[in-house]
Image (cartoon, coloured by chain):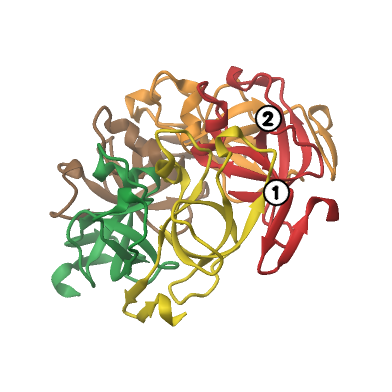
Chain colours: A red, B orange, C brown, D yellow, E green
Amino acid sequence: MNLAKVIGTVRATRKDHRLEGRRMLVVQPLTFDREPAGDPLVALDTVDSGPGDVVIYVSSTEATIPFRPGDTPTDATIVGSVERIDTDRGTWTRSSR
Amino acid sequence: MNLAKVIGTVRATRKDHRLEGRRMLVVQPLTFDREPAGDPLVALDTVDSGPGDVVIYVSSTEATIPFRPGDTPTDATIVGSVERIDTDRGTWTRSSR
Amino acid sequence: MNLAKVIGTVRATRKDHRLEGRRMLVVQPLTFDREPAGDPLVALDTVDSGPGDVVIYVSSTEATIPFRPGDTPTDATIVGSVERIDTDRGTWTRSSR
Amino acid sequence: MNLAKVIGTVRATRKDHRLEGRRMLVVQPLTFDREPAGDPLVALDTVDSGPGDVVIYVSSTEATIPFRPGDTPTDATIVGSVERIDTDRGTWTRSSR
Amino acid sequence: MNLAKVIGTVRATRKDHRLEGRRMLVVQPLTFDREPAGDPLVALDTVDSGPGDVVIYVSSTEATIPFRPGDTPTDATIVGSVERIDTDRGTWTRSSR
């Protein structure tokens, strides 16, 4: 799983019916130093994320698990809203952003 | 999921029978600044996309979900036609392309 | 899915029994300008491909779909033999190779 | 599977319910010379790993296997704690770290 | 599927029980010119491979197929021992190594 920051939304009225009612968020992957890591991508959401939130997202087939038993064609889904990170590089907490 | 622009088509008469009747489109992945991101690839379509359309596509096994219950050997499928993108870098709408 | 050119074969007598009778081809991934893209890889075949053929192959779990209902341990399978490609960069047809 | 070193933890109270009770560890992928290889990522744990441990983790859908029969949305899971590595570059044992 | 050379072993006594009894080999991915391609990784084995062997391995979920019907958390598995490779760059046979 990777760290990312929510930076926007995508609107697509014409889409696969299995995506109806799902919010598509634009997320910028981050390093654990909160620096951008590669290009932004589109992820579905399971934790009511909003712009600026630091989140954890899963990639690949696992991204469909939060929406089971239904089949949802997604390869990236936000599964947690991050409050605190402790690594050998220091501690980060949401309030410190 | 990633952003891409439809830039062409591929014709392959001799192919796995599970791909019969499926249009194969050539899509150029894009950054959220609408710049090319890497090399084009071949994707199946679910939303009647045409050349020039900005779309969202899924990769990997999830790409087979829109075609279930049948088994379709694809690792990239267009699942939405993009109308509007709002990020901290600004807003893009289809009419502005 | 990606474009590739068949450039060789691999022989492995001692192998997982689920691969018995399957031809292993060496394919060179190509850009849509027919330039090499990255290193060659080994793919199974479903369309009687031969050296020099330009093909479409699928990666990851989807590569096992053409061999179902059996389980086949492959992560790359050729699913189409390409006859014509039309993109905003021009047209390529098999006879013009 | 890849080698990594556990370097931290992530706390996310608001998360997909399938992740309740699972520890999220930050791991730094390593080369077989124990040098950092790319950016750290978040992995679930199955072997009571702690900071500094050298571990083996699996990626992609396989990362969900240790948690079956339940469905767990993870794409990286630690599956072994490494004691000894022998390669043509030499031998490494846990006590020598 | 990709080419690799077996270069070592990993010992992990504390591991997911589904990996009990499975040998973990260190493999160095190779190009078809037998040059190293990227960093080594850990793979399970199905064909009694030993150090120095040139093998074919599968990645991702397909790597679990040789161990079915059981569930095995691996994302890389050796599925063939290579005897001969013929490409437009020449022929390689095991005896010539």
- Residue A91 visible, this angle: yes
Q: Are marks 1 and 2 in contact (CB under 8 Å)?
A: no
Residue in the picture at 56% in, 42% down? D21
The subunit letter for the residue under badge 2 reads B
Crowding near the residue tagged with mark 1, few <14, some 14–19, many ≥20 C-alpha atoms within 10 Å:
many
Indicate whether A15 appears above or below D73.
Answer: above
| Left or right: residue E42 compared with residue B58 | left
Indicate whether D14 appears above or below C40.
Answer: above
| Left or right: residue A23 compared with residue D81 | right
| Left or right: residue E89 compared with residue A22 | left
The residue that mark 2 highlights is B53
- Residue C7 visible, this angle: no
The kind of residue tagged 2 is: Asp
Residue B16 spot, x, y in % from top left: 33, 29
Crowding near the residue tagged with mark 2, few <14, some 14–19, many ≥20 C-alpha atoms within 10 Å:
some
Q: Which mark is residue A4?
A: 1
Nearest to the observer: residue D35 or residue B44: D35
Residue C75 spot, x, y in % from top left: 36, 45
The subunit letter for the residue under badge 1 reads A
| Residue E50 quadrant | bottom left
| Residue A93 quadrant | bottom right
Nearest to the observer: residue D74 or residue A22: D74
Q: Which mark is residue D6?
A: none
How far is disc 1 from disc 2 in space, using C-alphas? Answer: 27 Å
Residue in the picture at 31% in, 48% down? E18
Q: Secondary structure at mark 2?
A: loop
The kind of residue tagged 1 is: Ala
